[in-house]
Image (tube, rainbow, N blue to C red):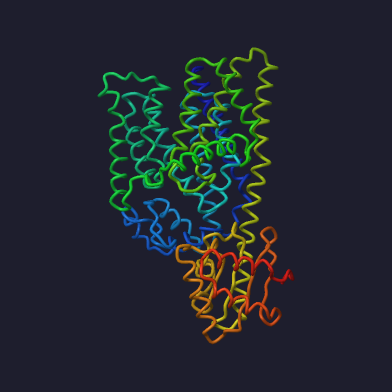
Amino acid sequence: MTPSAEPAISSRTHERAAALIIAVAAVLAYFSTLGNYFVRDDFGVVQLLASKPAAYFPRWFYTSWMDQIWGFTPDEVRPFPALSYQLSALAGAGSPWLHHVFNVILHIANGLLVLAIARTLTMSVTAAGLAGLLFVLLPVHAESVAWITGRVDSMPALFYLASFLAYARWRRGGSTSHALYGWSLALFFVALFTKQNTITMVATLAAYDVIVLRQPWTPIARFVAPYVPFAALTAGYLWLRLQLFGEVAREGALTADGLVQFAMLVERHLAHVITGDADGWRAVVVLALLGLIWVLRLARSDERRLILYFGPVWWFIGVAPILVAGYSSPRHVYLAAVGWTLVVAIAFDVLMTRARVASLQRLVISAALVVLTAYLLPLHRAVRDWNTMAAVSQRAVQDVRAIAGVLPEGSLIVVGAPARSWEWAMPFAVQPPFVDADLTTRFEFISPRSLTCCRGRWFEDTRAALRRWSEGPQPDSAVAMTWDPETGALSRAQPAASPQLGPLIRALLTLESPDDLDRNLVRLLGVLPTKVK
């Protein structure tokens, strides 16, 4: 072994150790979620995709992966996430365990990609490990990991980051690394067909070349050449979306009000990423930004360019798709948050290299540990909330199945599960594979609008169910059920013990507007007896 080989071997050993720490941290953070039940959209997504045959995969390249289970056709061409649900249903479509394992593995892989990107940027192993560790412990990622359907953001991030890493290494390797460029392009193709927000890749690569590598702009043909294949893939993908859905990127959602909402969301998401709290502490965000300004004064020009790129540039490219998302979710900043973790790691390297004495270096290390520790409590709270939602969801399925076993066919079941556990879940939650037989063929079900899959037809469907019940063979057999959102404790009422229940339910048929029906149905469920079964 030559002396020059020793540092390289030592560095690889340290990288493996950092990778192991990142993986263990992610597993420990989300281990409690592995046995969690399905919640919210999971019921519909798993029911649909697990039922598709293996040969269905090519069709997802030119059709919406969700068919029309939500009452409309989503403008989402996502063959690779669809395939992932088929794979994670191999343990049984009604078993959530492998779905959760898949999500945690995705999160670990993304943390390792953050580590690899940091090393490609020539950060120290310690700083790169800090970046990957921060990423897997960010509380803002709890929804993406603990919720089965959350993989719709962690999975595209995986291919996006892998494509970026291959591209960055290609740039570093020069003419001897052309295979890396091909891998980057192939991974970008997969990213596009995983989620539409990955259309930003050309901007990400061009900004990296201009800001970090300072690639010369001239001759222009040589400057543009690396982006042409990426741009061509993007254009082809957008053309496909135009043919399928009539829009390329939900541009119809671009309004003045939307821009105002976007600005507010970006601020809220930034606070969530930096502080770990959805509401954030504005003072902490300000202090963090002031600290970065101080670091910039100490940094070399190349380090400043990295902070500029992975700070505001990466962040705004990452959050840009939120402008047309149509709703707010912490999942939407899963990719953008990579920039924050890399900026913290760069700042760590800057301070460590400028610290002239060991005591200052220990102070910097202590500050990094404080930052990591500060995320643990909000992460624990976020994971605990998802565990609670899943436990309540499972209890609701079990209770509905049990009550259906003693009611005569044709009875009406009013389901008032907590929306945070069962939003969008009906009627899938009372159908296979979550129950043995389709309960909707034997009973009439109604629920508040927030729980239904298809809100556009909820009013008509609810009134139709009420009419069938009131005119059917069991017009006096009904049960109304609610669950405590924290404990899952069941409260229920039946006409035998609550004579007013039947007239209250029938009175719902007299309501002529969806809002009135929903409001009165929620009110009816809110006054059920508090006796717990």
What is the x, y in percent for residue 265? 53, 40
Residue 336, visible in the rendered structure: yes
Q: Is residue 43 above or below residue 413?
A: above
Instruction: Locate residue 232 relative to residue 167 in the image: left or right.
Output: left
What is the x, y in percent for residue 247? 33, 48
Q: Examine the image and state in which quarter residue 238 appears.
A: top left
Is 459 or 35 nearer to us in this picture? 459
Instruction: Return the residue found at the far right.
Output: 531
Is 175 or 154 nearer to us in this picture? 154
Q: Residue visible at 51% across and 37% down?
A: 263
What is the x, y in percent for residue 389? 62, 57
Is 171 or 257 nearer to us in this picture? 257
Q: Residue visible at 50% across and 69% down?
A: 432
Residue 158, visible in the rendered structure: no
Instruction: Return the residue found at the far bottom.
Output: 473
Q: Examine the image and state in which quarter residue 203 appears.
A: top left
Q: In the rendered view of the protein, which quadrant contains the C terminus?
A: bottom right
Q: Residue visible at 25% across and 24% down?
A: 221
Instruction: Locate residue 35 relative to residue 160 in the image: left or right.
Output: right
Is 77 or 289 nearer to us in this picture? 289
Q: Residue visible at 41% across and 58% down?
A: 66
What is the x, y in percent for residue 82? 41, 55
Q: Is residue 442 above or below residue 13?
A: below
Marker count (numbered): 0
Instruction: Return the residue found at the far top.
Output: 356
Q: Examine the image and state in which quarter residue 349 appears.
A: top right
